[in-house]
Image (tube, rainbow, N blue to C red):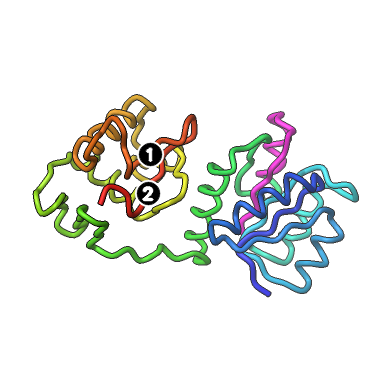
Amino acid sequence: MKYDCLIVDDEKTIADNTCEYFNMFDVKTCACYSMAEALSFLSENETTLILLDINLGDGSGFELCKHIRTKLNIPILFISARNTDDDKIIALNIGGDDYIEKPYSLGVLLAKVKVMLRRFGSMKEKEVPDLFEDGKLQVDKKNKTLMISGEPRKLTSMEFSLLCYLVENPNRLITKTELFDNVWKDKFTSDGTLNVHIRKIREAIEEDPKNPLRIVTVWKEGYKYVTGAGK
């Protein structure tokens, strides 16, 4: 069987929670809890990417990484509570592609994994229609126009890009980090700038911007575009 991601971590709760989260967002993931189990899994299955802890009950993630590198050329991202420079240097020198410290944000980790999967061809960018319609709201991505009840509304280029990302990912929490990574990309920005952009979008598409129905805030986390609201 072919998977997008294999998690190898002897902390079962963390591994299972990460696995469940990834599967919820269509990244087909399986978890193993020991070096022996991981080797058995890899002998019978395929995976495009591995998340690998350093401390395994029956061995070392470093040892497992070296073994995998003799057979497979796939991305290996180390995940560990060990945060010394020596550990990071070793991990990268033996073939690791990245080093992520625990505790990690599931949203940030998922974003990193998706980038790797796209790079290695396992996950294709989803096709998004040029025209999005939801009740009175109409977003034309191709022509970069926004209409409410047939009336044009104006947004800046960045505000329009942000709105497009929200409507393309409806009814789920989109973290601020995800928005920074996918809308602003490499450009530096801040929570304050994001909040201003969201306020401007709400002023354009919400009947009552102070009590928004379409773009709702998930406190301390991010935002969610709710379909069917504000018709």
Q: Which mark is residue 216?
A: 1
Residue 4 image point, x, y percent:
60, 63
Residue furthest out toward the right: 58
Which range is magenta? Answer: 74-92
Q: Splitting the image into 4 quarters, where does residue 193 fall?
A: top left
Q: Does the residue at mark 1 contact the one at mark 2 (Cβ under 8 Å)?
A: yes
Residue 16 image point, x, y percent:
72, 51
Is 98 drawn above or below residue 139 in the view shown?
above
Indicate left or right for 141 with 226 as reference: left
Check if residue 94 falls in the magenta segment: no
Query: As rendered, which of 24 and 124 lies closer to the eye?
Result: 24
Q: Residue at x 90, y 50 (%)?
A: 58
Quarter of the N terminus within the rendering: bottom right
Residue with the mark numbered 2: 226
Indicate left or right for 80 with 180 as reference: right
Indicate left or right for 169 with 152 as reference: right
